[in-house]
Image (cartoon, rainbow, N blue to C red):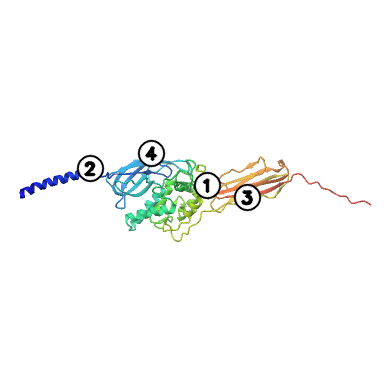
Amino acid sequence: MFHKLFLLIPLTLFLLAGCGKNSSSNAPDLAVQIEGHAIDSLVQGGTVTAYDFNNGQKGAVLGSAQTDMQGLYSLTVKSYSGLVYLELRGGTYVDEATGTVTSLKPDQFLSTLKYVEGGKDIGSLMITPLTTIAASLAQARISSGKSIFTAIDEANNDITHLFGVNILTTYPLSLTGGAASFSDSAQYGLILAGLSQMAAQISEFNNVPPGNIYTSIKLADTMAIDASDGILDGKQNGQQIYLGSYPLDSYNYRSKLGQAAVLFLTNPNNRSGLGWNEVIASLNTIAAMMNALFPSGDLPKPIDQIPPAITFNLQNNTAVNKIVTVTAHAADPSGIAGLTLTPGISITPQFQGQQGDISTYLYTFDSTQIPDGNITFTGIAVDRAGNQAQASITLRISNTPPVLNMTLPNGP
């Protein structure tokens, strides 16, 4: 009996092993496909690297891929379930505000954090400036003692809530590509375009060519540094953060970004057809945001909705046989994006100011070349928040001297 039992044991183990082998061959593939887009605007030729993040920091490399002409990346991670940190480095993109082809510098990157499960489709995963800020915020919360999963979920959700779009799964629509209707994708694209426009303004503030030093990805990385202490206040561990001599603050992420986004709508590179009235409600929601991302003392400021003030300089409302200069001035706390001055009659000026980013516009002409009568000059100004103002002034031309009717007294 003992010998029979002894002989059965190996046979049983053999059969179990065979069953195990068959079970393994029928097991689902534990590989996970990670794909999506790297977008500030579309980043081409960049390298996306996936890292194990289960310990709350970058671990082993799980795979890598290049982004194509549409910013698309796709990589396969085998036999892995857990947190993945994706990091994009290198590549080029066309800066939306300036139209400049821009290369990522060695110290610049975009990133995102996501839980993946082997054998399951995770959908499309974006890598953008907003996911970069969220990833930095998540790491700050991990360092403060929060569980890794909670920190990542909270950070992604907080940045999603701030900007009103799912930062991980929503595809940011390029507003430079053609006509578009307002949607979550268009809002995501508008926010990224606003970052690009803000970077151009920071370049102007620092008196350097836009799209050169202070690019939109440079701005995003600096914002991520700001988030690395767990709060968006323009400081890192209490020290003021600067881009050149431009200081960051909590309003950069709210009202200033909204104003830059509205200003982008007046940029010739915007081909979406979207207007101020379509986007202002959602942008004002961002501007009014109050949550733990910002210091409680930094109360929100609405996006500037006050139009510029236009004033005129005219020595006299009546021109008689002389050279006349009509000057329009425009002023606004947001800055003037454009000012024009148009006469209500066809005349050739001796001097006409240049249109564009100016606050003073001059129209000089010889009144003797104009028939007597009234001329109305109309000034139109647009500020950097997209508000428009219009004002007029009327000048009377009176070159013909009046006829004096004299009555002599009756003689004796």
Asked if residue 205 can be seen in this view, the reply is: no
Q: Which mark is residue 68?
A: 4
Inspect the image, locate mark 1, and give the three-letter code of the amino acid beneath it. Answer: Gly
Residue 352 position, x and y percent, is 62, 42
Q: State the residue in front, 266 or 4.
A: 4
| Residue type at tag 3 | Ala
Of badges 3 and 2, the one in the foreground is 2
Q: How far apart in space, not on screen, are marks 2 and 1 (Cα)?
A: 58 Å
Helix or strand or loop: what does disc 3 sit on?
Answer: strand
The residue that mark 3 highlights is 391
Secondary structure type for disc 1: loop
Q: How far apart are marks 3 and 2 (CA)?
A: 79 Å
Choose the circle earlier in sequence order: 4 or 1: 4
Q: Along the line of sight, which residue is nearer the eye, 74 or 228?
A: 74
Q: Residue at x 24, y 43 (%)?
A: 26
Gap between marks 4 and 3, in whole Å? 50 Å
Total marks placed:
4
Q: Nearer the N terminus, badge 3 or badge 1?
A: 1
Q: Name the mark on residue 275.
A: 1
Instruction: Name the image quarter holding residue 249.
Output: bottom left
Q: Which amino acid type is marked by label 2?
A: Ser
Instruction: Kindly check if marks 4 and 1 are in contact, taking CB atoms under 8 A apart as contact.
Output: no
Image position, residue 129 (x, y; %): 41, 48
> Which x, y percent locates residue 109?
38, 46
Is 399 left, or right, of 164 in this rendering?
A: right
As drawn, 95 above or below 240: above
Q: Residues within 10 Å of mark 4 (few under 14, many from 20)?
A: some
Mark 3 crowd level (few <14, some 14–19, many ≥20, 10 Å Cα): some
Name the side, left or right, on which 327 lies relative to 156.
Answer: right
Q: Say which mark, if any, is on residue 25.
A: 2
Inter-mark Cα distance, 4 to 1: 31 Å
Instruction: Choose the circle earlier in sequence order: 4 or 3.
Output: 4
